[in-house]
Amino acid sequence: MDRVLSSVKDFNPFGELYHDILRLAYFDEKDMCDQEVMDELAMERSTYYRRKKEAILLCGILLWDEMRMRRFA
């Protein structure tokens, strides 16, 4: 998963933002709710949900690609 999140970070133009949203919303020890993530990143509600949806989609595509490349015995 770390490799996938690293790949998300490299995506332009919003890779850093996508990474931060995913990290804070799903992978951080704090277990933040959406409002806390919006506050932390100083984002408006509509922009946050639009970018979160894009980040989840990108993460899913990259995760699928990562699993597709693995060779199973």
Image: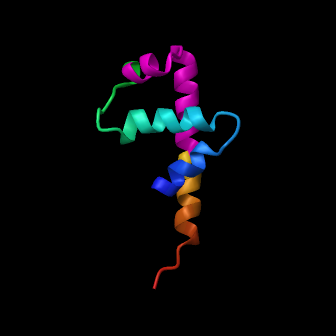
Q: At 46% across and 54% down in the image, what residue appears?
A: 2
Q: Is residue 45 magenta?
A: yes
Q: Is residue 33 left or right of residue 39?
A: left
Residue 33 coordinates in the image, percent (x, y): 34, 25
Residue 45 coordinates in the image, percent (x, y): 51, 15
Residue 54 coordinates in the image, percent (x, y): 59, 36
Q: Quadrant of residue 39?
A: top left
Q: Quadrant of the C terminus?
A: bottom left
Q: In the displayed structure, would residue 45 be above or below residue 26?
A: above
Q: Quadrant of the N terminus?
A: bottom left
Q: Is residue 33 left or right of residue 1?
A: left
**Residue farthest to the left?**
30
Residue 36 coordinates in the image, percent (x, y): 37, 20
Q: In the displayed structure, would residue 69 be above or below residue 46?
A: below
Q: In the displayed structure, would residue 2 be above or below residue 30?
A: below
Q: How is the image coloured?
A: rainbow
**Residue farthest to the bottom?**
73
Between 48 and 2, the one lying in front of the other is: 2
Q: How many marks?
A: 0
- Magenta stretch, residue numbers: 36-58
Q: Quadrant of residue 38?
A: top left
Q: Is residue 30 left or right of residue 26?
A: left
Magenta-drawn stretch, dominant element (helix, strand or loop): helix
**Residue farthest to the right?**
13
Q: At 46% across and 38% down in the image, what residue appears?
A: 22
Q: Is residue 47 magenta?
A: yes
Q: At 29% across and 32% down in the image, what residue appears?
A: 30
